[in-house]
């Protein structure tokens, strides 16, 4: 088994992450040629990596709160856990839903349908955003890391479209734009549902971020 296959343990996961971020074109070609199943992609790639931003975001909010200029809000433990679980499940769903859109639209843009190829594309293109989620442990820099990671993931998606979905070069940008809009739409809808879950975990507390003193909101 290759040291960068997603089914391998520990170092292989890190190796594939590094290869995808440093040599996306070459790595997409390897991914395209690899056999895969929905179960394997989720178990060995999406599930562990998507947990990074969900967990780190919750820990960061509990430790530092949310706010600016020294004053902000801190979620209750129950609220943070509820939001973490909702965000995690939402990410797993978004990966699959977006792959359905990509698979359905591929022929319209000179590509070929392929449900597994589309799922590979959405699963692996999220890598940069998920890895950047580590910095959510410190919210003041986590948002910036999220933006940069998101842009990098968009680049991975753009590079991967013609390699996995056989999109024609002339229509690659148009297909990418449509996929981006679809992804944003899915994220907004799922995000609204996710945000509503947080209220089940308990109220926020006002806090002075400098002193750490809290009071019920």
Image (cartoon, helix red, strand yellow):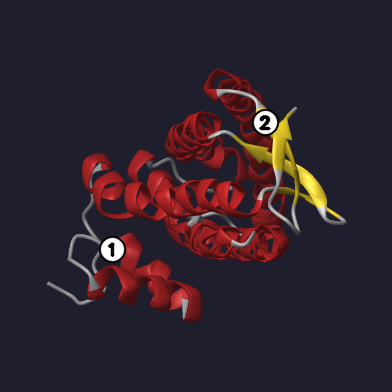
- Mark 1: few/some/many CA within 10 Å (<14, 14-19, 20+): few
| Identity of the residue furthest to the right in this view | 69
Q: Nearer the viewer, residue 167 or 208?
A: 208
> What percent of the width, then of the height, locates residue 168?
59, 57
| 45 vs 162, nearest the viewer | 45
- Residue 6 sits above or below residue 123 on the image: below
To which residue does mark 2 refer?
204
Can you tell which quarter of the image residue 190 is in? top right
Q: Crowdedness of circle 2 by 10 Å Cα count: few (<14), some, many (20+)?
A: many
Q: Position of residue 197 (x, y in %)?
A: 56, 22
Quarter holding the C terminus? top right
Q: Residue 19 has which mark?
A: none
In this rendered view, identify the residue nearer to me: 150 or 179. 150
Q: Is residue 82 left or right of residue 74?
A: left
Q: Earlier in the sequence, mark 1 or mark 2?
A: 1
SS assignment at label 2: strand
Q: Is residue 53 visible?
A: yes
Residue picked out by circle 1: 33
């Amino acid at each position: 088994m290759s040291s960068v296959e997603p089914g391998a343990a520990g170092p292989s996961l890190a190796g594939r992450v590094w290869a995808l971020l440093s040599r996306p074109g070459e790595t997409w070609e390897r991914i395209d040629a690899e056999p895969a199943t929905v179960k394997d992609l989720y178990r060995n790639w999406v599930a562990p990596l998507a947990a990074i931003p969900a967990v780190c975001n919750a820990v960061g909010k509990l430790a530092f709160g949310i706010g600016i200029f020294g004053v902000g809000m801190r979620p209750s433990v129950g609220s943070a856990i509820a939001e973490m679980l909702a965000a995690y499940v939402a990410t797993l769903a978004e990966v699959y839903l977006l792959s359905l859109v990509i698979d359905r639209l591929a022929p319209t843009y000179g590509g070929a349908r392929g449900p597994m190829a589309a799922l590979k594309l959405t699963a692996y293109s999220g890598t940069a955003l998920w890895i950047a989620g580590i910095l959510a442990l410190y919210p003041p820099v986590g948002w910036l890391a999220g933006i940069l990671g998101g842009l990098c993931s968009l680049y991975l998606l753009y590079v991967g479209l013609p390699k996995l979905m056989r999109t024609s070069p002339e229509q690659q940008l148009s297909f990418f734009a449509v996929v981006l809009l679809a992804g944003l739409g899915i994220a907004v809808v799922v995000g609204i549902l996710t945000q509503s879950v947080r209220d089940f975990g308990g109220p926020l507390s006002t806090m002075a971020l400098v002193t750490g003193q809290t009071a019920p909101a």
